Amino acid sequence: MRRTQTRGALGRFKRFGQALTVTAAIVMALPTGALACTQIYMGKGVTDTGDTYVGRSEDYASRHPKAFGIQEPQTNPTFHSDESNFTWTYNGTTLRHTYVRDLPSGWDGYTDAYSEAGTNSAGVSVSATLTTNYNDKIAAVDPAGSEDQDNPSGLGEYTIPDIVLGCATTARDGVKLLGQIVDEKGNYDMNQIIIADSAETWVFMQLSGHQWCAVNLSAAKIGDVYTTDMVSVNPNMSSLKFDVNLEDPLVCLHSEKMVDVAKEAGTDKYFDDGNFDVASSYGADDGIAQMTRYAQGHAYFGSPLADGTYTTDFTAAKGWQGVTSLTDPELLFQPAGKVSLFQALRSYAARGEQTSSLNANTNSQLYAIGNNRTVETHMFQIRNAMTSDIATIQWEALSRDEFSVAVPSYSALLTKVDTTIYPEIDKWDETHTGASESKDSVDAAMDSSTDNGSLDYVLMDINTLAYNNRAKLAKNTRAYLDALQKQLIAQQTTVDSVMQKTAVGQARTDLANTLFEQASKETYNKCKALLDEMRAYLKGDQSGEFVPSDYDATTGDLKTPVAYATLLFKPEITGQPQSATYTQGDKAADLQVTASIPDQVKGSDSKLSYKWDVKFTGDTSNKAVATAGATLKAARATTDTNEGSTHSVDTSKVGTYTYTCTVTNTVNGQSVTSDPATITVKAAAAKPTTTTNAPTKKSAPATTTGKPGKVVSTGDTNNMMVPIAIAVAGVAIVVIAVAMRKRNRE
């Protein structure tokens, strides 16, 4: 996380490789007195899923792109920094991990800069860094490496995530590793880092030049309340207090001289129970932008600051307004109720809407958690009872979180990403950023000709247009993105049930890659269509309300669902077409097949396609003799394609027809074929023959008994069948003889 501060500022901006005048311009563009990131933790006891949620939003510049990708294992790597002279060599092969990195243009061309967030193949996740500060007295005793502008040294944000993700097999191992490196190499600056796995979630604090402290949020207890039943909102504050047992290694690990350095500086403070107060001993005074966000965070979780515990100032004509002081601010607090996954994800976009005095939507001089300088937000959903490969779901929202969507992934399993949506770090075309990444340029966002096809730029443009046209675009843009986010959340539950049943190993890896690609494509397609409509609206007369065409304002949902979970399922036929018999020329009922995709997604059946197959299998007219042409026709099978779940029945031709319907899930290509339905079309019954010499009176017809040697009278209807039978028998004999002769030849 980049920040504006007087101490170490020039060293921090060394990465730009620019002259001092350019560096000064960048500093002036940032909020005065503001460290600008927000780290949020929600313990498993306060979430409605029973999972731990933890992550961070990074604030820097409105149109600053980030690269999401995979870091492959390395053998015996030497880690370095472009912000100091730090180097450290690892002996062995590192772990594969995901990253969200800065582009090379911001770090003198390096492609390994500041991984920020990721999960490795062992299931260890890192969120880094939340920049903090230290007080002047501590700085005098144990200065950070950034204090020496001529020879900056120590471990900083450039390298921290890669070291932990590459080398730690558990969260505790990651904490110990960072502690060892700080003991040896020192800290470049002050930060907080989240290191977590399925068993433990730690917050690691870089306190001063060589001091550090790490608290296990999965095991600590504050008073009578476990930290798993609490939340934390930290907007770059070093003064947030936590009273835990620092000497219990299950709860806390720290540098050997942590207390001694504070004593030497004369800043050591203690709680009433005798525990060392780390924050009060090392922390610095926090600024108005930090304290305002702290108050917004409390309000968001239904636990607003109590009257008398803070002061405010809303009179400043320039600069920031908001909270100016806090009394005993705490690192952790209890929310008003259970936190849903959607609520957790949206917490990183909070703008103080819960209280009128802190609402940044109505007061532009209030700095908000969700602001127009956020460049990326990530949150790890950590499930304690699962194996490390699938225990963590990484929800990644690129660009500013206020108008963004978090895409889920099993990041411990990922081995590849779609590089059309997530361009490779060394192949980014940054033209679309505009003239300056610090300028939230509407013109740049409106220019589709320079878009590189990345999800980052699409979300960046949506944010630029909605933020700068808040009255016209913000309401329904956010409503649409909320509906999209809720669908991804709901479908992730279905997806997860399939993942848990998938065999451990390559099968899970393949599924994780496929799922992330699908979720990313669906999110990109939905958001790109939204962006196109926003651009068109702004180019038009803007006379009506902006409503995305895919948004149903009545239901608050998408008109066309996201096809995420839909990818995993084969169609099911619940209603088969029925066989029937008709007389030639009758009007027949349509055949119908009923099918669905068992993904529990409302509207996903629209992704089904239907293909009917019709075969003519025989003539049922019982004609004794068929012409050669008729015989060939009876043997010929024909196919008819009819899109739709129903198919009309043709009764114009006598015969037997077999109908089947193949139903396909167009998202994954999987198909199922219906049972055959047999349709029999019979010839109409022959009408009675009328004879011209029939008796006109009601009397018995005259009959003549046939005698030997005499021809039978044609008027004898019984005996008329005799010559007919003889003729039929003769034909049959001929047919049989021909067939036998043919067979003998063969």
Image (cartoon, rainbow, N blue to C red):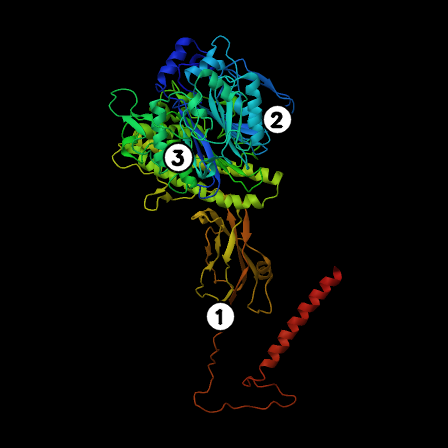
* x then y, percent, for residue 13: 44, 14
- Quadrant in the picture for residue 740: bottom right
Q: Tell me the tag on residue 159.
A: none
Q: Is residue 52 left or right of residue 319?
A: right
Count how many numbered circles sit on residues in the image. 3
Residue 276 in the image: above or below residue 13: below
Of labels 3 and 2, earlier in sequence is 2
Q: CA distance from mark 2 to mark 1?
A: 81 Å
Q: Tell me the tag on residue 684.
A: 1
Q: CA distance from mark 3 to mark 2?
A: 34 Å
Q: Secondary structure at mark 1?
A: loop
* x then y, percent, for residue 214: 51, 27
Task: Tell me which residue sits at (43%, 37%) in the image.
Answer: 230
Identify the residue position indicated by label 2 in the image. 94
Contact, mark 2 vs mark 1 (Cβ under 8 Å): no
Quadrant in which the C terminus appears? bottom right
Q: Amino acid at mark 1?
A: Ala
Q: Amino acid at mark 2?
A: Thr
* x then y, percent, for residue 273: 45, 31
**Residue 286 visible here:** yes
- Quadrant in the picture for residue 556: top left
* x then y, percent, for residue 253: 54, 27
Q: Tell me the tag on residue 347.
A: 3
